[in-house]
Image: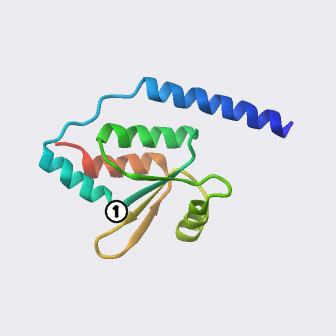
Amino acid sequence: MNMLIKLVRNALGLVIVSVDVLTRWSRVKRTPEAQLKANEAAKHLTLYHFFACPFCIKTRRAIYKLNVPVEKRSAVQGSPFRDTLLQGGGKVQVPCLHIRHPNGDEQWMYESGEIIAYLNKQFSIS
């Protein structure tokens, strides 16, 4: 029974990911200087995710649309990034955006809506 559940979950995940790739929006266009600034700001961000998680896909779509090169780390079972997520954020829940602030503080943001709102605030073009 567990094998059937895994098979169905993986098949649905593949369908969701395929639809995501086929229906992506266009990316935000910035001046070269503004894009360099966004790229630099994104160096302090890491997204922990599962490949086929609907909330992670939603978050990755926002990152794609905002044209921000956020480092992505898979937190699947057996991944060393899963341990990093657990130690740093205190729980294995995805999506999780790890933010390293310039003053040295760290923040672990877990809710997709909160992550997307943060990214929009930081990287949207006014």
Residue 85 position within the rendered picture, expressed as x and y whole percent measured from the top left: 55, 63
Say which quarter of the image contains residue 106. Answer: bottom left
Near-viewer residue (90 or 50): 50
Count of numbered circles in the view: 1
Please report the residue visible at 55 percent of the width from the left and 37 percent of the height from the top: 54
Is 48 situated left or right of 63 in this image? Answer: right
* Relative horizontal placement of residue 14, taking residue 31 as reference (left or right): right
Label 1 environment density (alpha carbons within 10 Å; few <14, some 14–19, many ≥20): some
| Nearer the observer, 17 or 99 | 17
Relative to the observer, which residue lies in front, 90 or 67?
Answer: 67
Quadrant of the image for the N terminus? top right
Amino acid under disc 1: His
- Left or right of 44: which side holds 47? right
Q: Is 66 situated above or below 100?
A: above
Q: In the rendered image of this protein, does residue 124 appear above or below residue 20?
A: below
Question: Is 97 rendered above or below residue 28?
Answer: below
Horizontally, is 46 left or right of 15 in the view?
Answer: left
Residue 110: x percent and y percent? 50, 55
Q: Position of residue 51 (x, y in %)?
A: 56, 42
User: Which type of secondary structure does the marked residue at label 1 adopt?
Assistant: loop
Q: Which residue is mark 1?
A: 44
- For the point 45% across and 28% down, which residue is it? 21
Q: Position of residue 89 (x, y in %)?
A: 53, 66
Q: Residue at x 56, y 61 (%)?
A: 81
Residue at 17% in and 41% down: 30
Locate the C terminus and report the quarter of the image it occupies: top left
